[in-house]
Image (cartoon, grey):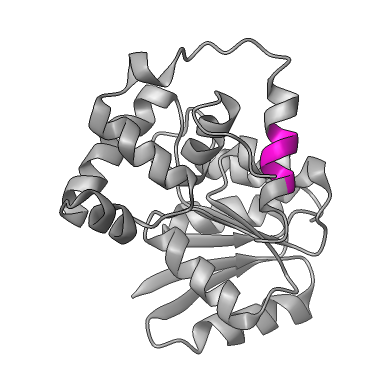
Amino acid sequence: MIRVVIADDQPLIRAGLATLIGAEADIEVVGVAADGLAAVSTAQQLRPDVVCMDIRMPGQDGIAATRALCGPGVEDPIPVLVLTTFDIDDYVFGALEAGASGFLLKDADPAVIVGAVRSVAAGNGTIDQSLTRRVLREFTTRRQTQPVTAGRATELLTARELDILLLLAQGMSNEEIAEQLVLEVSTVKSHLARMMPKLGVRSRLQAAVWAYQNRVVEVPD
């Protein structure tokens, strides 16, 4: 059972998301919060598999709350899926930098939202398809002005880890990567677990962004 906390300052949206997500047989909504501070305290108390986080909330916004739950330095991070009505670039970048495992617009199809919850719970990142290319291009451009301290991927990663990173950056799931490389899914997960600390990232989504940022793969047109 996937346990979820929903954080949104609008009661109707909280109720709608709870009804939508909680209707799935394999998902349980275990808590709700109306602001960022409550989202952090509720998630830390209940330890859900996923927090569905709004961005614009009173008290503490969703980006700050995300950083508190899964940002750099958090020893036992809780995965966050950001759901917002706004596709403003600064919000997207802020969510990624804060450690979010996924970013979707609230007007996404219900099946996409449910699928994103499952994907994040499984350790896979997700991002709204309408934003993917723009986000990767803009994120990469912004980061090019800053020094890359991680070094080249070929110096950091084994050959197999690099293979996996390249496929990950193409949006493949663990299962698809395993099939492509003729590996067990558990082996792919083990490689990912060893690879991400080397890159200084906390999620598959951040690993994919790292690959584009460091020109391991080219940003799609």
Query: Is residue 48 visible in the rendered structure shown here?
Result: no
> Considering only vertical position in the picture, is 180 above or below 21?
above
Q: Quadrant of residue 165?
A: top left
Q: Which residue is nearer to you in this view: 36 or 114?
A: 114
**Residue pictured at 60% horizontal, 70% vertical:** 32
Q: Which residue is nearer to you in this view: 19 or 160?
A: 160
Q: On the rendered structure, is 189 left or right of 3?
A: left
Query: Is residue 162 visible in the rendered structure shown here?
Result: yes
> Considering only vertical position in the picture, is 217 above or below 111?
above
> Considering only vertical position in the picture, is 137 above or below 57?
above
- Identity of the residue furthest to the front in this view: 221
**Residue pictured at 41% horizontal, 39% vertical:** 166
Percent x, y of residue 186: 18, 52
Percent x, y of residue 124: 42, 55
The N terminus: image quadrant: bottom left
User: What predominant SS class does the magenta segment belong to?
Assistant: helix
Tell how many labels: 0
**Residue pictured at 72% horizontal, 54% vertical:** 131
Q: Which residue is nearer to you in this view: 101 or 147?
A: 147
Residue 137 included in the magenta stretch of the image:
yes
Q: On the rendered structure, is 77 left or right of 57?
A: left
Q: Magenta span covers which residues?
A: 134-139
